[in-house]
Amino acid sequence: MEGVEERLLRALNEAGEIKDSGDWAASAGVDHAALVGTIKSLLAYEMIVAEEIEHQSWTLTDEAKGYLDSGSPEAQVFNAVPDGGIPLDGLKKSLGAVADIGMKQAMANKWLAISKGEGGPTVQRKVASIEDKVQRLLTSLSKGETLPTPDLDYLHKKRKLVAPSTWRTYLLGKGAKFALEKKKAATDLTREMIQSGAWKSEEFKPYNFNALGLPTEGGHLHPLLKVRAQFRKIFLEMGFQEMPTNNFVESSFWNFDALFQPQQHPARDSHDTFFLTAPAATKELPEDYLQRVKTMHETGGHGSTGYGYDWKRAEAEKNLLRTHTTAVSSRMLYQLAQEGFQPRKYFSIDRVFRNEAVDRTHLAEFHQIEGVICDRGTTLGDLIGVLNQFFARLGITRLRFKPAYNPYTEPSMEIFSYHEQLKKWVEVGNSGMFRPEMLQPMGLPPDVSVIAWGLSLERPTMILYHIDNIRDLFGHKVDLKLIKSNPICRLGL
């Protein structure tokens, strides 16, 4: 079956022009609204030219349609008044809402008059008969007849009984690229066109350099990354050097043994740590350092009695997902001792893993922030001073310290800050001085001490972004809307 486009092009080819697309659509049995789409498509291909023809007609309002049979309001009121007159109240009661409109128009037309008597106002006829001009005009208009402009203005502007309706049709002619069949212009130069030479006669669609491209999809920073960047900036401003933290998999030796953490410690149990099955063990450990660590665990040294147990190499070789970034600190301190000691300030911010039950405040993986300062003669007072300086840059000025126990620091302190919104002291981190049993086997000078502290990245992020469930911040349940739209982060303001 021949399509609308083909029929239109054939008719235009035969007649030379189509004077009115509306008339052609009616004769062809085509919906003109659908035909307009075809016309616009052919115009885009320059196959036809078109000139708009504007049409206007008048349509009756719903109110006017009701007057076609019953007559205008003024005529209804006149016909309801008998020769002897009728009380005004009785007239309104019999006609309802039409009475007010009709009475006003009938009085203006001098068809009726109101006389006052003892029984109240009475409506009287002033003429014997009337012509309902409004009904006559509305009937003519409903039949498609043309009315004089004054009559249309009266019905439209004064009585609001008709409304204008406009539409457009087109005078159509042949365009510069007229053809009986539309040929779609090529959008790409293909290999086949080049090989066959068809590109020489092919018509290509011109580039529209003014067209807007698709909106670019940019990346979005996770709130954790924003807060991490602020912490990293603070460390760098304080002169710290960032440690390489690219080893998620670590040996038990660097994660536990080098930190003077005994092999029977509960943290080394599978209930708290993720151990690897393949590769299950590491074979690359510094032998001389390993022997010094072994001796320190078994018999002690440098004033320590050690733990007094049979240290096992196989336990130290077990691979695991690191439980803290302090494993990185132990590697860096050992490397510093081998290269020749120089005072250093290190920091790291990266992911750690612990075999914990997942709830609204705990995940099996999270991020740890750690700061380490190694120098000669550093004391607990230095640690407290650095902590006050560090947290002041975060906007936290009220700190308290509580004695605590850690296997590889002595003394150790928990860090508390006063939460202005919660009106109470909350724990914000942990700190301490690395034990000599950890530092001496590395080969560091005896007068060198190391102060360190750590805190999580998730907790301050949750506070800053008003998130009460850690699973809404990190993990597979995170709402992507949070990632795509979240405030900037500025610490310490």
Image (cartoon, rainbow, N blue to C red):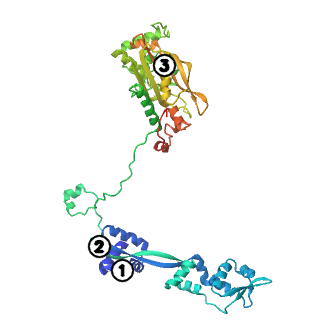
Q: Of residues 253 and 135, which is closer to you in this image?
A: 135
Q: Of residues 441 and 167, which is closer to you in this image?
A: 167
For the residues labelled 3 and 2, the Cα–Cα distance comes to 86 Å
Q: Is residue 161 visible?
A: no
| Helix, strand or loop under label 1 | loop
Q: Is residue 182 above or below residue 280?
A: below
Query: Within 10 Å of the Cα at label 2, are there few (<14), some (14-19), or many (20+) other Cα atoms?
Result: some
Query: Image point 46% across, 34% down: which residue?
Result: 227
Q: Is residue 400 above or below residue 289?
A: below
Residue 22: quadrant of the picture = bottom left
Query: Within 10 Å of the Cα at label 3, are there few (<14), some (14-19), or many (20+) other Cα atoms?
Result: many
Q: Which mark is residue 159?
A: none
Callout 1 amino acid = Lys
Q: Is residue 412 visible?
A: yes
Residue 71 appears at what percent x and percent y?
A: 62, 84
Residue 365 appears at what percent x and percent y?
A: 48, 31
Q: Which mark is residue 19?
A: 1
Query: Within 10 Å of the Cα at label 1, are there few (<14), some (14-19), or many (20+) other Cα atoms?
Result: some
Residue receiving disc 2: 175
Residue receiving disc 3: 383
Residue 482 appears at what percent x and percent y?
A: 49, 42
- Mark sitting earlier along the chain (3/2): 2
For the residues labelled 1 and 2, the Cα–Cα distance comes to 15 Å
Does residue 243 appear to the left or right of 404 in the view shown? left
- Mark sitting earlier along the chain (3/1): 1
Query: Image point 63% across, 82% down: which residue?
Result: 105
Callout 3 amino acid = Leu
Is disc 3 in contact with disc 2, using a CB cutoff of under 8 Å? no
| Helix, strand or loop under label 3 | helix
Callout 2 amino acid = Gly
